[in-house]
Image (cartoon, rainbow, N blue to C red):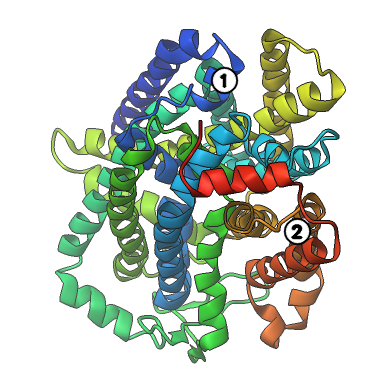
């Protein structure tokens, strides 16, 4: 390990120490009750609500997965995905946040998503609650594995150590931090991490453009690759049987661009639908201290998301100009941000390693801010909704929190096993988990908030139908290609919605108590 790498490591360790310090500060309050541990006692301000929602949502794929996608095949896939996410973010804050905040209070002061759905339908037998909790466990375990892959790639690339060892080290750090402070620590540190991520993205892209000789040079290079800078065409790297891109005289080879039609655009825009079912975002809507502050949070979130997504995509375009043949597989392409950071910042006199360390900390920040959310929500789903809700109804707060920490450990181990493959593609892992949450909970959330005819049977059908279709489409149907090659979230979201409507209409309507509560929330009455 050379001097520069050592200085980068020291900077990252200092950053990690600050993050752990935040956990220790909030640990005492978090451990006072499960309400504080899992939802922070509904005390978040607008800035923390906005920044923690977006930082926990974006994860390491914003700094590695999305730039890697743009570096590998050009603008279209990455840009349309970013546009879908921007639109989805805005609509979620606009139409879901206020109604969910009210309803979660009115429906028995719910502090987890499964508990909200269960209370919404006045369940005695916790069937909706159990199904929701189980799906959260499944998809968040997959999600957490993508974060561990990010840690492994970051530390392995930076320090030249084996991927598996580095992945396990990152997983242990995330686990310890999450156990320490709970939701309040997670949200407070996510605010800081959102700032670090923003700094990392903007710093690297600005210096990258300068190093490349200006914006014009970057664009001209991209234009020289057929389909690379098109919104309606996709560049196609020429790869051998191992997936390695071919290089001739130092130039990576691309084939003819393929058309990027309306079906592909709809497939990428469908990412925006996922927001309506993302527990890590929806919980922030429930945790803010006052409903009136959600408008400010929405504005903060949209500025952060719009700039961050645009810059992340452009980093991939700049990277193709500066390091055309450095990364020759789709998996390794996700390291472009790390390479640019080391090369552009590490050699700056005096402050270079510190800046590079901060930018690397940005990747770590993105990973921590997401994985701690995923682990905490998954643990709360089991401990609060299955253990206390079904298995041991008289469990004390202390027992619930002990069980949540045991669950954290189990989920982390399973996620680490999934992440053990060094060739894992972060974007691919995230896309599957994102589809799972979006289709399982997205339609149910929208209908729960805005359709009073929805009943318990419809809710169960929607969750099972949406999740089942994600697996079926991904594993079986997508392989047929053509129109069936569309991102599984879109057909699964539609299928879930159809299941909800049909089953609700052919079964008994909800009770008058449920309807009255719905109308009270609609009118803004949460007393």
Within 10 angstroms of label 2, few (less than 14), some, or many (20 or more) residues?
many
For image coordinates 69% across by 66% down, the residue present is 497
Please state which of residues 154 and 296 is positioned toward the viewer in this rendering.
296
Which residue is rendered at x = 48% and y = 39% of the image? Answer: 525
Residue 267 vs 42, above or below: the answer is: below
Residue for point 56% across, 59% down: 274
Find disc 1 in the rendering and name its residue.
35
Q: Which residue is more in the foreground, 141 or 510? A: 510
The quarter of the rendered structure image containing the N terminus is top left
Check disc 2 and report the residue beneath it. Answer: 462
Q: Quadrant of residue 124?
A: top right
Q: Where is residue 354 in the image (x, y as percent from the top left)?
A: 24, 33
- Residue 288, label in figure: none
Q: Where is residue 183 in the image (x, y as percent from the top left)?
A: 50, 26
* Label 1 Cα neighbours within 10 Å, binned few <14 / some 14-19 / many ≥20: some
Q: Report how far apart the C-alphas of labels 1 and 2 lie in the structure.
A: 28 Å
* Secondary element type, mark 1: helix
Image position, residue 416 (x, y; %): 68, 37
Q: Nearer the viewer, residue 30 or 168?
A: 30
Quarter location, residue 503: bottom right
Determine contact: label 1, label 2, CB under 8 Å.
Answer: no
Label 2 residue SS? helix
**Residue 446: image x %, image y %?**
59, 57
Q: Earlier in the sequence, mark 1 or mark 2?
A: 1
Q: Is residue 335 visible?
A: no
């Amino acid at each position: 390990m050379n001097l520069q790498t050592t200085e980068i490591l020291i900077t990252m360790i200092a950053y990690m120490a600050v993050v752990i310090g935040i956990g220790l500060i909030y640990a005492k309050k978090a451990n006072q009750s499960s309400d504080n541990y899992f939802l922070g006692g509904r005390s978040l301000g607008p800035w923390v609500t906005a920044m923690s929602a977006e930082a926990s949502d974006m994860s390491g794929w914003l700094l590695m997965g999305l730039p890697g996608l743009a570096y590998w095949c050009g603008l279209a896939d990455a840009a349309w995905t970013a546009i879908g996410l921007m639109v989805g973010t805005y609509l979620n804050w606009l139409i879901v946040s206020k109604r969910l905040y009210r309803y979660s209070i009115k429906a028995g002061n719910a502090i987890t998503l499964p508990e909200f759905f269960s209370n919404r339908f006045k369940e005695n037998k916790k069937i909706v609650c159990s199904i929701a909790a189980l799906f959260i466990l499944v998809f968040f375990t997959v999600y957490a594995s993508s974060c561990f892959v990010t840690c492994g790639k970051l530390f392995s690339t930076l320090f030249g150590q084996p991927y598996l060892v580095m992945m396990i080290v990152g997983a242990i750090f995330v686990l310890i931090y999450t156990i320490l402070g709970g939701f309040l620590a997670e949200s407070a540190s996510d605010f800081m991490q959102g700032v670090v991520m923003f700094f990392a993205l903007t710093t690297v892209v600005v210096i990258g453009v300068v190093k490349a000789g200006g914006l014009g040079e970057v664009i001209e290079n991209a234009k020289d690759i057929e389909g690379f800078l098109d919104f309606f065409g996709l560049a196609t790297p020429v790869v051998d049987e191992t997936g390695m891109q071919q290089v001739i005289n130092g130039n990576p080879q691309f084939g003819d661009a393929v058309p990027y039609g309306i079906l592909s655009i709809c497939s990428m825009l469908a990412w925006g639908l996922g927001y309506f079912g993302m527990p890590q975002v929806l919980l922030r809507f429930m945790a803010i201290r006052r409903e009136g502050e959600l408008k400010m949070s929405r504005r903060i979130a949209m500025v952060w998301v719009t700039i961050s997504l645009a810059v992340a995509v452009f980093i991939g375009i700049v990277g193709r100009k500066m390091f055309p043949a450095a990364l020759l597989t789709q998996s390794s392409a996700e390291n472009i941000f790390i390479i640019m950071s080391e090369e552009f910042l590490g050699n700056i006199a005096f402050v270079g390693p510190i800046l590079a360390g901060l930018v690397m900390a940005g990747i770590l920040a993105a990973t921590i801010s997401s994985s701690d959310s995923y682990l905490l929500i998954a643990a709360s789903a089991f401990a609060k909704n299955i253990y206390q809700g079904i298995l041991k109804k008289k469990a004390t707060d202390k027992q619930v929190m002990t069980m949540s920490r045991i669950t954290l450990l189990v989920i982390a181990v399973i996620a680490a096993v999934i992440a053990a493959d060094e060739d894992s593609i972060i974007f691919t892992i995230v896309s599957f988990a994102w589809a799972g949450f979006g289709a399982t909970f997205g339609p149910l959330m929208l209908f729960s908030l805005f359709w009073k005819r929805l009943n318990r049977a419809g809710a169960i059908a929607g969750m099972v139908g949406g999740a089942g279709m994600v697996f079926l489409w991904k594993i079986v149907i997508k392989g047929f290609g053509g129109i069936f090659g569309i991102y599984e979230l879109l057909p699964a979201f539609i299928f879930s919605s159809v299941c909800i409507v049909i089953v609700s209409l052919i079964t008994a309507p909800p009770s008058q108590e449920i309807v009255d509560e719905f109308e009270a929330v609609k009118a803004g009455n949460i007393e």
